Amino acid sequence: MTGIEVEVADWELGCCGGPLAIGDRVSWRLLAVLDDTAPEDVWTATPAPDPGPGWSARVLAARGLQAGWSDLSAHLPVGTVRLRARLSATWHGGDGWDDLPPVTGRITRIRVISRLHQEGTTAATGQSSTWYAAHGGRTFVSVPGSEEHRDVDTAPDGVADRADTVPPRDQSSYRAESGWLVDLQLDP
């Protein structure tokens, strides 16, 4: 049986997912998020519904999986593409990817994801970093390569260390939990 790693964002689980536990059987649609730290894979990119002005969107297929991809600043050609991307779960709907076939499987491992956030204005090239606009106009960007994981048995509706934590004015960085990395053993 094939296994994959899927990131589950804190907001996604809190919105529409409910708690997760090792042994749970789940069914999710997948999104591909560009990430220079992910292993490179070969995907077949086909046109996707128009996500709006300036956006590029593709349906990516590889190893029997399909994932949605969209970006405001990057463009993927149609055909065979090599890219580094991590898979992210989505199930709340209304995001333009409702027609993607879901993957279904059993959760075999759950890790809390924490990232270092640095005050700044731009994300590194090739990194789909999450930006956190904080009080007082401060913006924090996830630092590439700063991700750490901690094994847990369950993923509740929210992480204990909220990603919207704002550091004091004299600090320009902070570490926060932002979701989970789930190992999913796919159904045949």
Image: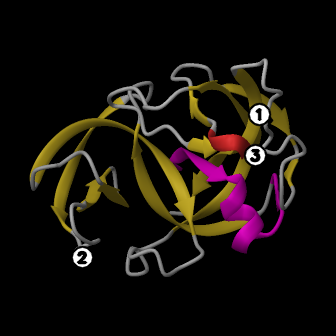
Q: Nearer the viewer, residue 126 or 61?
A: 126
Task: State the image coordinates of residue 149 (x, y, percent, origin top left).
Answer: 73, 28
Of labels 1 and 2, earlier in sequence is 2
The disc placed on residue 164 is 3
**Residue 69: numbered disc:** none
Packing grade of label 2 (10 A; few <14, some 14-19, many >=20) is few
117 and 126: which one is in front? 117
Q: CA distance from mark 2 to mark 3?
A: 32 Å
Sequence-wise, which precedes: disc 3 or disc 1?
3
Query: At x 76% / y 34%, what residue is drawn?
Result: 176
Q: CA distance from mark 1 to mark 2?
A: 34 Å
Q: Amino acid at mark 1?
A: Ala
Question: Where is residue 181, by image quadrant?
Answer: top right
Q: The residue tagged with tag 1: helix, strand or loop? A: strand
> Which of the two marks, 3 or 1, is nearer to us in this view?
3
In magenta, the rendered stretch is 1-22
